[in-house]
Image (cartoon, rainbow, N blue to C red):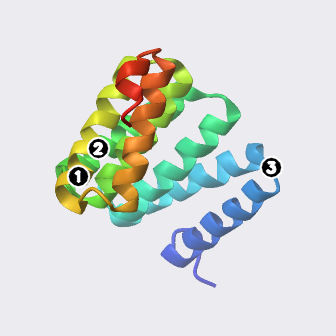
Amino acid sequence: VFGEEHLETLRAIRNLALTLISQDELASVRELQQRDIEGTRRLLGEDAEETLSAMHNLAITLKRLGDTSASQELDEHVLAVRRRVLGEDHPDTLKSIGNLAVTLQRRGDLARVRTLHEEALARCRRLLGEDHRDTLQALRNLGTTLRQQRDLAAARPH
């Protein structure tokens, strides 16, 4: 009804991809998510939130497929655009920091993961306060990374 390049068609593709993910059919999902990215990019632009969300979804799928290099590339891109477009303190920018940290953790880059978690924690504390669930999650993430780095003295307070 709408055609291949309509936003509603792309949203239907995104929903189908989510259904296939829940059925663990990741090979099919990758192709659908790539179509979603290409379509939203053409319709809304590279910096549009729907385009960035589509890229984020593909990055998660790539992680699950074991392609952490491609996942990192997408996570880095989404974070850079969100920093530029939304600003450092926007909730979606903070989520992108966390997404990149997960990818880097899978790649074994714990030093960079630690830096990202420290940044996220500082921003959450300043923006949301000590008792907000996002701040507590950031605190937990940093503590986990410190423990993985065998820095138990630093991990303990977290």
The amino acid at mark 1 is Arg
Image marks 1 and 2: residues in contact by CB distance under 8 Å = yes
Q: Earlier in the sequence, mark 3 or mark 1?
A: 3
> Is residue 42 at least partly visible in the picture?
no
Residue 116, compared with residue 112, is above or below; it is: below
Q: Quadrant of the C terminus?
A: top left
Q: What residue sits right under mark 1 in the picture?
A: 125
Image quarter hosting the N terminus: bottom right
- Residue at the spot 61% in from the left edge and 64% down from the top edge: 14
Q: CA distance from mark 2 to mark 3?
A: 35 Å
- Quarter of the image where one finds residue 119: top left
Label 2, residues with CA under 10 Å away: few <14, some 14-19, many ≥20: many
Q: Which residue is mark 3?
A: 25
In x, y percent, where is residue 146?
42, 24
* Residue type at tag 2: Leu
Q: Is residue 155 above or below residue 129?
A: above
Question: Mark 3 or mark 2, which is nearer the start of the sequence?
Answer: 3
User: Height in image: 47 above or below 73?
Assistant: below
Residue at 40%, 27% in the rendered image: 155
Residue placed at 48% from the left, 49% from the top?
A: 56
* Numbered disc 1: secondary structure: helix
Q: Which residue is mark 2?
A: 121
Q: Is residue 139 left or right of residue 5?
A: left
Q: Is residue 136 above or below residue 10?
A: above
Q: Residues within 10 Å of mark 3 (few under 14, many from 20)?
A: few
Element marked by disc 2: helix
Looking at the rendered structure, the secondary structure element under dot 3 is: loop
Distance (Cα) linking label 3 and label 1: 39 Å
Task: Determine the residue positioned at 58% across, 81% down.
Answer: 2
Which percent across, then down, holds residue 137? Answer: 43, 50
